[in-house]
Amino acid sequence: MSLRADLADAWHDLVVGGRCVGCRRPGRLVCPGCRTDLPDRARPSPPDPAPPGIVPVFAAGPYEGILKQLVIGLKEHQLLGLRGPLAGLLALSVLEAVAPVAPVAPVARTGAGPTILVPVPSRPASVRERGLDSTSAITRRAAAMLRQHGLDVRHHRLLRTRPGVADQAGLDSRQRRANLDGSITCPASGIRTLARTVPRATFVVCDDVITTGATAREAQRALESVGLGVKAIATVAATQRRSRVQM
């Protein structure tokens, strides 16, 4: 964990009293017990129903319990000390996503080029309100973690949202697709920079949570529209489809 994250934890402890976001015990933001209970690998987690044409989706676990509290703690409460655990979970999903490319050896040794992690862009209004782009933050840190293990993984913010995109909260899958249709773009400036530095690459779209898959699919479309092939979508957590039958 970085010095900045440690200082953020210390500030939180001093001002409001530190508690684990999982079990609520006094102490660090993620206590040793809850950290031990975090997933140790990711699994395929496609949305149901899946948007047509979406690439394989991976998540470290369901969006509930400790994973849900981690996401909410960073995104809604700016608990910066949670970036490390969340990035570690996202890194697990990236590893599963690129496993056919690099099951054991570092990507750089396979000749396939680097893996580029592209975060789903947040609405500028949301970033200003929260003072943090949490998805980009954990994607950047996940890339750094994977590089420490010898993998050629990089973070590039290639995507932007177009004006007029509404908050997704409360929208069903059809409404989300309509809201997001054409909402994400890949500016030419980013492509030119990438082309100069990375002639060959594998692209993975990254997000904190996948719900209906509409946002991730739109990000995939934006990258593919400029000729960048997307291999997979990597996330921290995936929401579970709930049966409509009342028990």
Image (cartoon, helix red, strand yellow):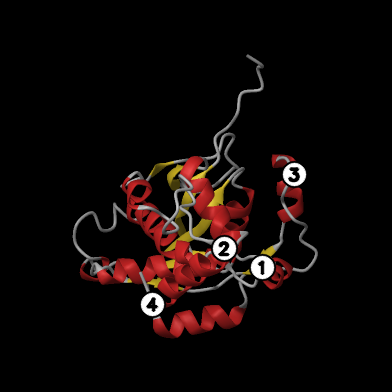
Amino acid under disc 3:
Gly
Q: Is residue 237 above or below residue 138?
A: above
Q: Residues within 10 Å of mark 1 (few under 14, many from 20)?
A: some
Quadrant containing the N terminus is: bottom left
Q: Which residue is mark 2?
A: 16
Amino acid under disc 4:
Leu
In space, the residues marked 4 and 2 are separated at their CA atoms by 20 Å
Locate residue 183, reporting x and y percent.
Answer: 71, 61
Q: Label 3 near label 2: C-beta < 8 Å?
A: no
| First-in-chain label (4 vs 2) | 4
Q: Which residue is mark 1?
A: 130
Q: Which residue is mark 3?
A: 170
Which residue: 51% across, 69% down? 14
Q: Which residue is mark 4?
A: 3
Locate residue 36, reporting x and y percent.
Answer: 31, 47
Question: SS class of the residue under badge 4?
Answer: helix
| First-in-chain label (4 vs 1) | 4
Amino acid under disc 1:
Arg
Q: Residues within 10 Å of mark 3 (few under 14, many from 20)?
A: few
Question: SS class of the residue under badge 3?
Answer: loop
